[in-house]
Image (spheres, helix red, strand yellow):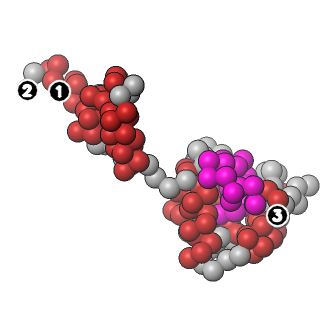
Amino acid sequence: MSDKEKEKQSVSPAGVGYDGPRYSIQCNEVSELDKVIPDLSDDEALQRALRIVRRHKKKTFVEMVAEYAEEKALRAKDIYTAAQIDRKLLSKILKDPEYSPAKDTCIAIALALKLSHDEAAELLSRAGYSFSDSSMRDVLIEYFFASGQYDLSFVNDVLFTMHQPVLGSSRF
């Protein structure tokens, strides 16, 4: 294999170097998309592209919240009460599959759902957020998920004591 071929192999379709599959869509499907994207004015090509993308689209934040709530037999009232958010906000979130709430709201909902650390991190990622190892607040919040401490009042007490912004509507 020539150097140019090796270089092409280690570069994502966007041209940014990468060291393995980073996206849920595989290289052969990127090639399929490359064939149909330029011709999206053709209905058949558009439908093929949509099928490829839909096969690899992950669940949204809202879909995951609904799934966890059902799995844990939690009602909306249980969630908004434990998360200390307004019922109208939770209703808005659950009614709009594309709605992406603020990071604090996502964390409060994840605590209300009593998710594991990995589940909470995955739920946050579906809303476009992540825990940051460089943020004292995020490290503390990760600790609560890892240790199974889901009481938002207790979490807020510790955050407040550590001079970090608190979560939910009980802001100081």
Measure how far apart labels 1 and 3 are at the Cα level: 54 Å
Q: Between residues 158 and 152, which one lies in front from this camera angle? A: 152
Q: Is residue 8 left or right of residue 120?
A: left
On the image, the x and y values in percent for residue 88 come to: 82, 59
Above or below residue 147? Residue 166 is above
| Quarter of the image where the N terminus is located | top left
Q: Nearer the viewer, residue 74 or 168?
A: 74
Classify the position of the C terminus by image quarter. bottom right
- The magenta-colored residue range is 90-110
Q: Earlier in the sequence, mark 1 or mark 3?
A: 1
User: Which quarter of the picture shows residue 49?
Assistant: top left
Label whose residue precedes the other's in the sequence (1 or 2) = 2
- Can you give x and y, in whole percent of width and height, for residue 8 in the image? 22, 25
Q: Three-letter amino acid code at disc 3? A: Arg
Residue underneath mark 1: 6
x, y percentage for residue 26?
28, 42
User: Is 96 included in the stretch rendered in magenta?
Assistant: yes
95 inside magenta stretch: yes
Which residue is rendered at x = 82% and y = 63% of the image? 87
Say which of marks 3 and 2 sits in front.
3
97 relative position to 18: left or right: right
Q: Residue at x 33, y 35 (%)?
A: 44
What residue is pinned by disc 2?
A: 1
Distance from disc 1 to disc 2, alpha carbons, whole Å, reads 7 Å
- Find disc 3 in the rendering and name its residue: 87
Whether residue 158 is visible: no
Q: Earlier in the sequence, mark 3 or mark 2?
A: 2
Query: Dots 1 and 3: beta carbons under 8 Å?
Result: no
